């Protein structure tokens, strides 16, 4: 078990600062969720309705999650996992591996809606595709190489935003899970628990 370097400790501190931003974002502090349900219209069509997060509050949360998601950030999720894996006791390293697997699953497991869609000759977009297309075409950058995908996904209307918001909420939960392990490793207090919603521990993703 290697002792963390001074640089490692700075990165862990930056991770905790980013996790605090995630925890303080109103969708998380209020344990909000997104919902979608379908119903038959009077003329026999199948229509979908969505309950989504407030746009500005969601963008603020996404900006905080991005501090951990971006590969070049010092608080990057995978980087912090590697620091703990080589520096923490074996029990903590096992817990880190479990949280990392859940984080990756949130980015790689295809949403049921996506499995039913074929856009631009793709059988489905992964959650990672959805998130990065939204991040880099609308929210924080305008990447021209992604604009065709963005235009295709925008055809889904609120389904697209519903899935993006669900992905970000799921990542936020895993970010806070990892922050608990960082806090324990540093012998610091954990962030306050989320007291309401479906889980008093951490937010989950979307209801389908």
Image (cartoon, helix red, strand yellow):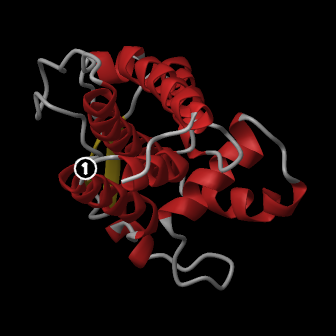
The residue nearer to you, when weighing 94 against 139, is 94
Question: What percent of the width, then of the height, locates residue 175?
Answer: 38, 39
Does the image show residue 107? yes
Q: Which residue is mark 1?
A: 89
Quarter that holds the C terminus: bottom left
The residue nearer to you, when weighing 24 against 89, is 89
Task: Give the residue displayed 72% in from the left and 64% down from the top.
Answer: 149
Task: Give the residue displayed 64% in from the left and 53% down from the top.
Answer: 132
Q: Secondary structure at mark 1?
A: loop
**Label 1 crowding class (10 Å Cα cut-off): few <14, some 14-19, many 20+?**
few
| 69 relative to 173 in the view: left or right | right
Whether 108 is drawn above or below 160: the answer is below
The residue nearer to you, when weighing 195 against 2, is 2
Question: What percent of the width, then of the height, locates residue 73?
Answer: 67, 39
Does the image show residue 158? no
In the rendered image, which quarter is residue 174 located in? top left
| 112 relative to 154 in the view: left or right | left
Question: What percent of the width, then of the height, locates residue 89?
Answer: 25, 49
Whether 114 is drawn above or below 172: the answer is below
In the rendered image, which quarter is residue 179 located in? top left
| 105 relative to 201 in the view: left or right | right
């Amino acid at each position: 078990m290697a002792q963390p370097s001074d640089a490692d400790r700075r990165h862990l501190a930056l991770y905790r600062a980013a996790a605090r931003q995630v925890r303080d974002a109103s969708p998380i502090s209020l344990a909000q969720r997104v919902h979608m349900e379908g119903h038959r219209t009077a003329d026999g069509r199948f229509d979908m309705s969505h309950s989504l997060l407030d746009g500005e509050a969601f963008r603020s949360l996404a900006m905080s999650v991005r501090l951990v998601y971006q590969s070049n950030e010092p608080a990057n999720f995978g980087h912090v996992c590697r620091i703990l894996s080589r520096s923490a006791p074996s029990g903590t390293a096992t817990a880190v591996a479990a949280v990392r697997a859940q984080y990756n699953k949130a980015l790689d497991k295809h949403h049921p809606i996506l499995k039913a869609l074929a856009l631009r000759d793709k059988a489905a977009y992964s959650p990672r595709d959805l998130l990065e297309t939204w991040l880099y075409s609308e929210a924080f950058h305008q990447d021209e190489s992604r604009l065709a995908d963005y235009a295709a996904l925008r055809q889904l209307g609120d389904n697209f935003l519903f899935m993006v918001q669900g992905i970000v909420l799921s990542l936020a939960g895993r970010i806070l899970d990892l922050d608990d392990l960082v806090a324990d490793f540093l012998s610091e207090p954990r962030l306050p628990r989320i007291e309401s919603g479906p889980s008093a521990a951490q937010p989950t993703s979307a209801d389908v």
